[in-house]
Amino acid sequence: MSDILDLIDNALADLTGPDAMRWSPERTPEQPTGIYQILDDICAWLTVNSITPDDVPIDAVPTITGGHIVCEVYLRNDAGHAYFEPGTTSIARGTVRVPLSAEPPASLTAWLAGEVPA
C-alpha cells in the first residue's frame, strides 16, 4: 500500500512541486502573462475562496451557484495522501461546496464558462 501512496505522492509532486506553476503573492507585475496569468488568477481566486489549488484537477471547472462555489477536487485520506479509486488507476475525486467569499476576476469569465483559455 505504501508503494501506491509513494506513486501518487510522486505524481502529485510532479504537478505541484517547486517547478510547477504556483501562485505566489511575491510575483512582480512583469510576470506571468497569457495563459500563465490566467493560471495565476485561477490559483489566487481559488485560494481566496478557501479551495486549495493543488487539490483541483486540471480539467475541473468550478461553478458558482446560490452564493457557493462547487468544485471537483482530489480526495485525500486521513494521512493527507491522494489515493486511487478502488479497482482503477484514477485518482479519487469528490466535490466541495464552499461559500463564495470573493467574486472571480473578469479574466476568469471564459474559463468559468467552460472555455479553454488560449
Image (cartoon, rainbow, N blue to C red):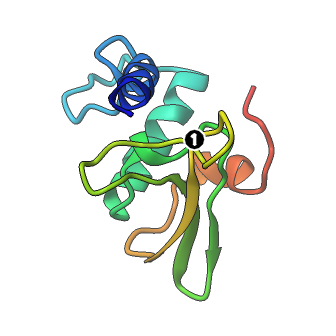
Relative to 1, is 108 above or below? below
Relative to 20, is 65 above or below? below
Q: Nearer the viewer, residue 57 or 5?
A: 5
Amino acid residing under circle 1: Ile
Q: Nearer the viewer, residue 109 or 68?
A: 68
Q: Quadrant of residue 82?
A: top left
Q: Nearer the viewer, residue 23 or 3?
A: 3
In the shown orientation, is residue 9 left or right of residue 92? left
Question: Which residue lies at the image location 62% right of the left edge and 73% below the top edge?
Answer: 64
Query: 10 Å neighbourhood of mark 1: few (<14), some, or many (≥20)?
Result: some
- The secondary element bearing badge 1 is classed as loop
Relative to 69, is 66 above or below? below
Quadrant of the snapshot with the C terminus: top right
Query: Looking at the image, which residue sits at the far top?
Result: 19
Q: What residue is disc 1 on?
A: 91
Q: Nearer the viewer, residue 75 or 53?
A: 75
Quadrant of the snapshot with the N terminus: top left
Where is residue 20? Give x, y as percent.
40, 18
In the shown orientation, is residue 72 left or right of residue 24? right
